[in-house]
Image (cartoon, rainbow, N blue to C red):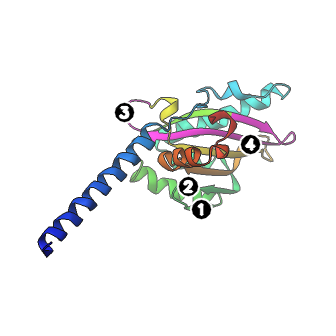
Amino acid sequence: MNRRTVRRAALVTAAVAAAGAAAGYFWLDATSAVHRTGTPHCADVIPAGADRADGEAVCATLDALTAAWGRGDADAYGRLFTDDATYTTYIGSHYEGRADITEGHRALFRDFVKGTELAAGYLDMRFLGKDVVVLTGRGDDYSGSRPALGELSKVQTYTLVRDTDGVWRIAAFHNTRRQNAMERFSFLYSPATAPKAER
C-alpha cells in the first residue's frame, strides 16, 4: 500500500469517526428533554402550611425582577437584592454585593442581553424558618417568542430573606446552564445518577 492510499484511508476513517461522534452528540441532545419543567406561576409552588402572604411576597420579588430585566433597568434590578447579596452566573462570574450586581447588569443590559426578556418555570419553594426561603426553578433570557418551559436552558436557585425593612430580597442567586447531551449521556451510562423526577 502506498503512502497516498494510507493517507486517504486515515482521512476517511477520521471523517467517519467525526460524523459518528457528531451524530451521537446530536442524538443525545435531541433525546434529553426534562420531565419536570416546573410551572410558569410562582404561586403554584408555595408550600402547603406556609404563610400564603409571605409566599406571595416572595413571588412578587421574582415578578419585579423579571419586569426590571425586561425594562433593562439595572437600578430596579439591583434593589431586589440585599446589600451583601451574591450572584453567580452560568459562565461562572461571581458578583458580591448589590452595587456589584447592579453595575454588572447595567453593562449586560447595554450589551449582551439588551432587549431581552426573562422566562421562568418554578420547581420548588422551601421556607427555612420564617425569614428565609429557597426557590428553585428553570429560566432563560430570550427575545422574540417566549420559550416553552421544557426549552429553558438554565437551572436557578434563589435564596431570599426578609430584609430589615420587611421586604423579601434575594440574598444569593446561582445560575447553572443545563448541559443536555452530557446529562443524557450520564443518565444512560449510569441510570442511578438521574434525579427521581427524570427517571
Q: Residue furthest front?
A: 1
Residue wearing tag 2: 89
Contact check, label 1 and label 3, Cβ < 8 Å: no
Helix, strand or loop at label 2? It is loop
Mark 4 Cα shell of 10 Å, populated few (<14), some (14-19), many (≥20): some
Residue 191: where, in percent of width, then height?
63, 43
Tell me which numbered mark, 3 or 4, is placed earlier along the sequence: 4
Alpha carbon distance from label 3 to label 2: 23 Å
Mark 3 Cα shell of 10 Å, populated few (<14), some (14-19), many (≥20): few
Alpha carbon distance from label 2 to label 4: 17 Å
- Amino acid type of the residue tagged 3 in the rendering: Gly
Residue wearing tag 3: 144
Question: Residue at coordinates 39% horizontally, 30% vertically from top-left?
Answer: 145
**Residue sitting nearer the eye, 79 or 53:** 53
In which quarter of the view is residue 198 placed?
Answer: top right
Residue wearing tag 4: 134
Alpha carbon distance from label 1 to label 4: 19 Å
Which label was assigned to residue 94?
Answer: 1
- Amino acid type of the residue tagged 1 in the rendering: His
Alpha carbon distance from label 1 to label 2: 7 Å
Extent of the magenta region: 124-146
Tell me which numbered mark, 3 or 2, is placed earlier along the sequence: 2
Alpha carbon distance from label 3 to label 4: 30 Å
State whether residue 12 is above or below residue 32.
Answer: below
Residue 3: where, in percent of width, then height?
14, 75
Question: Residue at coordinates 38% horizontally, 44% vertically from top-left?
Answer: 26
